[in-house]
Image (spheres, rainbow, N blue to C red):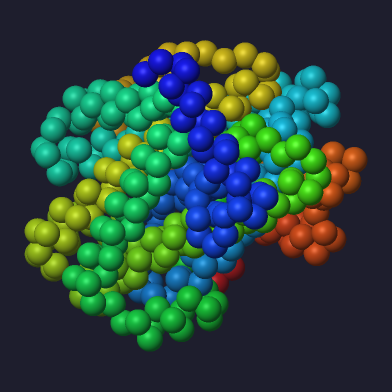
Amino acid sequence: MSTPMVQAKENKAILAARASLSRQQKGLRALLPFLGPAFITAVAYIDPGNYATNIQSGSEFGYKLLWVVVLANLMAMLLQNMSAKLGIATGRNLPEMCRAYCPSWLTYVMWGFSEIAAMATDLAEFLGATLGLNLLFHIPMLFATLLTGAATYLILALERFGFRPLEKFIAALVMLIAACYIVETILAKPQFSQIAYHSVVPWLGNSDSVLLAVGVIGATVMPHAVYLHSGLTQNRIVARNEAEKRKIFRFNTKEVVIAMSLAGLINLAMMYMAASAFHNTGRTHIADIATAYHTLTPILGSAAAAVFLISLLASGISSSAVGTMAGQVIMQGFVGFTIPVWLRRVITMVPTIIIVALGVDPTRTLVLSQVVLSLVLPMPVIALVYFTRRRDIMGSLVNRPIVTWTATGCAVIIVALNLLLLYMSFGGSLPG
């Protein structure tokens, strides 16, 4: 497609957004031009790392840790909305803000750690898609790795046609994952009274449940998604004045609530499906995705197992594409240069190819990748809270005091829980 045609399509989307801002469109039609960025970042919250932690939590403790999913999703919703707001208010993404306001040495330190986090994230997502291809179609792991790389590159290539085709495709994959879990819910027949109760009533038992609860939060709030969301909104619909910024932000908030609520419901479904299919049938130690698939077949039938793998494949491929996009934003923002998408795709494939070639356990690698993310997560969260509380940076979109305090509380909880996860992952134990 030629550049003028691409520009025409983007202009059409922008004109539709302008019509909404001027109240020529109302209701759902007014919201439609603003849907996209939150659905892209929502993919990070339903990636293969979430599959691993949710399935293990549901199989071992039944419905009792559903409240952790709700808590993690509420925190993620707040942080993603703040990240999007930063892009709308400043026209810059979070890494660019760090480069502009932080000392050079700190910027390079943050860039280095953020690149490691992006690669760890991509490793987990890439492995999830590879494992899905292997289990669903019996494709050898090494060949499945190459297919995953090609598929994610083709998705990223949609960007050359403008921002809307990529947004629509990613949103379609999110809807596919949601549809898969509607099917799983019908087949698993969970106890809805237990779901409602444990979604709002906190429970923590032994140190194993604490470790899994921390793992669920660690697998949910992702550093690369916090960085990426500001990059997706910074130049998408450029506000002409402060009043338009406030209107765009209100539409953005609605989109974040919709997209993140959908991601939260999918995570809840992952856990209560495991609770119903595994915990309630005495299979309380399902600790990896492959075992979950093989165990589902005799319990719920081959259709349920196949639907589970289709959702995993859609999750892995879409989240791997989003992880590559985040890597581009991180590099461009922190150090001011980019590399071709195909080259980043090849570079980030290398660790996965090495792990697969060496025969390393994929699920164990997923867990270790979450530990790496735990080390990096505090940086973008603290930076985000710092920038969005400053009126000289945010203008009329500066945080209200209650938002800053709530976000600070989220940051403290996330940092504390991630430190606890690291402590327990390296052999530490809780009293009792």
Residue farthest toward the front in the current orientation of the protein: 24
> Percent from the top left, x then y, of residue 129?
29, 38
Residue farthest toward the bottom in the current orientation of the protein: 193
- Say above or below: 286 vs 190: above
In the foreground, 72 or 18: 18
Name which residue lies at 27% across and 43% down: 313
- Say above or below: 191 vs 125: below
How many numbered marks have been drawn onto this rendered protein structure?
Answer: 0
Q: Quadrant of residue 134?
A: top left
Name which residue lies at 28% across and 77% down: 190
Question: The C terminus appears in which quarter of the rendering?
Answer: bottom right
Horizontal side of residue 406 vs 175, given as left or right = right
- Say above or below: 224 vs 107: below
In the foreground, 89 or 229: 89
Name which residue lies at 40% across and 56% down: 53
> Percent from the top left, x then y, of residue 197?
46, 83
| Residue 363 is at least partly visible in this image | no
| Residue 21 is at least partly visible in this image | yes
Horizontal side of residue 402 vs 70, given as left or right = right
Horizontal side of residue 81 vs 189, given as left or right = right
- Say above or below: 299 vs 367: below
Name which residue lies at 60% across and 47% down: 19
> Percent from the top left, x then y, of residue 306?
15, 53
Question: The N terminus appears in which quarter of the rendering?
Answer: top left
Horizontal side of residue 260 vs 420, given as left or right = left
